[in-house]
Amino acid sequence: QVQLLESGGGLVQAGGSLSLSCAASGRTFSSYPMGWFRQAPGKERAFVAAVSRSGGSTYYADSVKGRFTISRDNDKNTVYLQMNSLKPEDTAAYFCAARVGWVVSLNQYEYNYWGQGTQVTVSS
């Protein structure tokens, strides 16, 4: 079992930056591929980014590629999402998730543990 706690959300103007963190409990954090997902009002939750267990491989949704960077620090049991050049359409609740398994997945239904989410609002 792992518990996840996101932080770092807030209100930012278009073109600005935010850095999200997701702290995990437990001593097996490095065994989980990790992902970030987001859900805008009235829309389904969508994949944003994912990172392999070692941090050596990363994956991004086309809509955030080149603007967002996912990383992890296994010594600190934390995964990060650096968001630059933010757009109003990035406004959503952002969730981190941990997957029990060897490989990364872009499918939210293949993730086992979820944080409670942190709100990101980008004003135009």
Image (cartoon, helix red, strand yellow):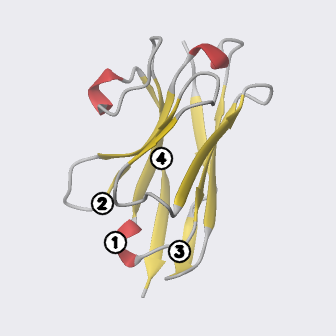
Mark 4 neighbour density, 10 Å: few (under 14) some (14–19) many (20 or more): many
- Which amino acid type is marked by label 1? Glu
Can you name the residue that lies furthest to the right here? 75
Dot 1: element: helix
| Element class at badge 4 | loop
Identify which residue is drawn at 49% across, 73% down: 86
Give the number of the mark in front: 2 or 1.
1
- Quick check: can you spot residue 116? no
Q: CA distance from mark 1 to mark 4?
A: 17 Å
Q: Which residue is mark 1?
A: 89
Q: Three-letter amino acid code at disc 2?
A: Ala
Q: Nearer the viewer, mark 1 or mark 4?
A: 1
Relative vertical location of residue 48 with respect to residue 22 in this rendering, above or below: below
- Quarter of the image with the C terminus in it: bottom left
Q: Amino acid at mark 4?
A: Gly
What whole-number distance in Å separates the C-alpha atoms at marks 1 and 3?
11 Å
> Between 42 and 34, which is closer to the camera in this rendering?
34
Separation (CA) of disc 2 from disc 3: 18 Å
Check disc 3 and report the residue beneath it: 85
Question: Residue 70: where, in percent of width, then height?
Answer: 58, 45
Q: Earlier in the sequence, mark 1 or mark 4?
A: 1
Which residue shows up at 30% across the image and 60% down it? 40
In front: label 3 or label 4: 3
Total labels drawn: 4
Pointer 4 residue: 117
Disc 2 + disc 1, Cβ < 8 Å: yes
